[in-house]
Image (tube, grey):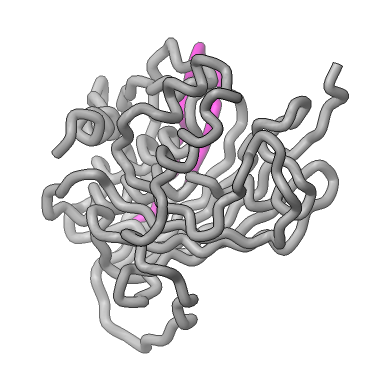
């Protein structure tokens, strides 16, 4: 396991400070605010610590309430709402400076059999034939501010290989509201299904809301562009490993009212639909001045 992946696993593991109370540190990815996927992954990790080991998360629904401060830890308060015969429900509130910055409801279920069907996986190139995100960014890194360039080219815990990337994010062309990328961790992980789930929750926010910008010829790097997650939902359908290749197929059916909406399906390399995602977020264009 690489050092950066080990650091991420540690970041998501959390410190127990009281019954149902956990504390997590924050990671600065270069823009001074806590990355939304970090709060998702840590909140799910906190909930998992209060759930019987034979139950696994099958859905989560979350709201981002305030920006997170990367210089301060985050406290996660878990409410044990329900423990039923088959399902367990938890509510998690993430707190900084005495105020909630995020809340999430998550449902867990024992393993059960039943009817099975799924949407067919889309056609996509082999991930090893595609450029990594760092290789792609390196081509225009001289146009980025120093702090962004360093972060963009740094070693990462996840390998990301976009299928149809924007050629130049600084001066983008208009594209249909659709994107796909392969992802996996940069090293092997323990055989812990919960670990793989909250790592996928962390990674599910990669290049997600920005898909709604594609038809408008802008990216989050466009001067005056404000992009921020409002809510995030995720459903886990089948077992998977996040240290094997997964394909996130994303579409944006609507943008209106300074908000973009995206939804996606995540498939393993054999075409099994392992998870589904949805998010709405702020996509607001300010006057460049």
Asked whether residue 91 is drawn in magenta, I would say yes
Q: Is there any visible trace of residue 161 in the rendered image?
A: yes
Q: Position of residue 200 (x, y in %)?
A: 36, 50
Q: Main secondary structure of the magenta part?
A: strand
The vertical placement of 10 against 266, above or below, is above
The quadrant the C terminus occupies is top right
Asked whether residue 121 is drawn in magenta, I would say no
Q: Nearer the viewer, residue 181 or 242?
A: 181
| Image-quadrant location for residue 8 | top left
Q: Nearer the viewer, residue 220 or 78?
A: 220
Q: At 28% across and 28% down in the image, what residue appears?
A: 11
Q: Position of residue 107 (x, y in %)?
A: 40, 57
Look at the image and give the residue range highlighted in magenta.
Answer: 88-104
Q: At 57% across and 17% down in the image, what residue appears?
A: 145
| Image-quadrant location for residue 240 | bottom left
Q: Is 197 on the left-hand or right-hand side of 182?
A: left
Q: At 23% across and 25% down in the image, what residue appears?
A: 16
Q: Position of residue 157 (x, y in %)?
A: 29, 37
Q: Nearer the viewer, residue 144 or 25?
A: 144
The vertical placement of 251 against 225, above or below, is below
Q: Is there any visible trace of residue 81 in the rendered image?
A: no
The vertical placement of 46 against 241, above or below, is above
């Amino acid at each position: 396991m690489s050092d950066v992946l080990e650091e991420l696993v540690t970041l998501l593991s959390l410190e127990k400070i009281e019954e149902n109370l956990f504390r997590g540190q924050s990671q600065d990815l270069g823009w001074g605010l806590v990355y939304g996927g970090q709060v998702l992954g840590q909140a799910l990790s906190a909930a998992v610590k209060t759930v019987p080991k034979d139950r696994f998360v099958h859905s989560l629904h979350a709201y981002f309430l305030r920006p997170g401060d990367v210089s301060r830890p985050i406290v996660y308060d878990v409410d044990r709402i329900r423990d039923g015969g088959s399902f367990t429900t938890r509510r998690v509130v993430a707190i900084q400076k005495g105020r909630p910055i995020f809340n999430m409801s998550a449902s867990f279920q024992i393993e059960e059999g039943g009817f099975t069907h799924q949407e067919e996986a889309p056609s996509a190139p082999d991930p090893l034939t595609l450029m990594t995100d760092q290789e792609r960014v390196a081509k225009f890194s001289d146009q980025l501010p120093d702090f962004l360039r360093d972060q963009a080219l740094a070693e990462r815990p996840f390998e990301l290989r976009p299928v149809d990337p924007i050629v130049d994010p600084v001066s983008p062309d208009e594209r249909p509201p659709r994107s796909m990328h392969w992802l996996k961790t940069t090293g092997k992980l323990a055989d812990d299904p919960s670990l793989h789930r909250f790592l996928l929750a962390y990674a599910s926010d990669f290049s997600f809301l920005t898909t709604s910008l594609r038809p408008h010829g802008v990216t989050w790097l466009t001067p005056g562009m404000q992009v921020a997650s409002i809510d995030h939902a995720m459903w886990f359908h089948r077992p998977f490993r996040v240290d094997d290749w997964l394909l996130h197929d994303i579409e944006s059916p609507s943008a209106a009212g300074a908000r973009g909406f995206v939804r996606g399906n995540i498939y393993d390399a054999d075409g099994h639909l392992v998870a589904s995602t949805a998010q709405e977020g702020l996509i607001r264009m300010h006057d460049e001045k």
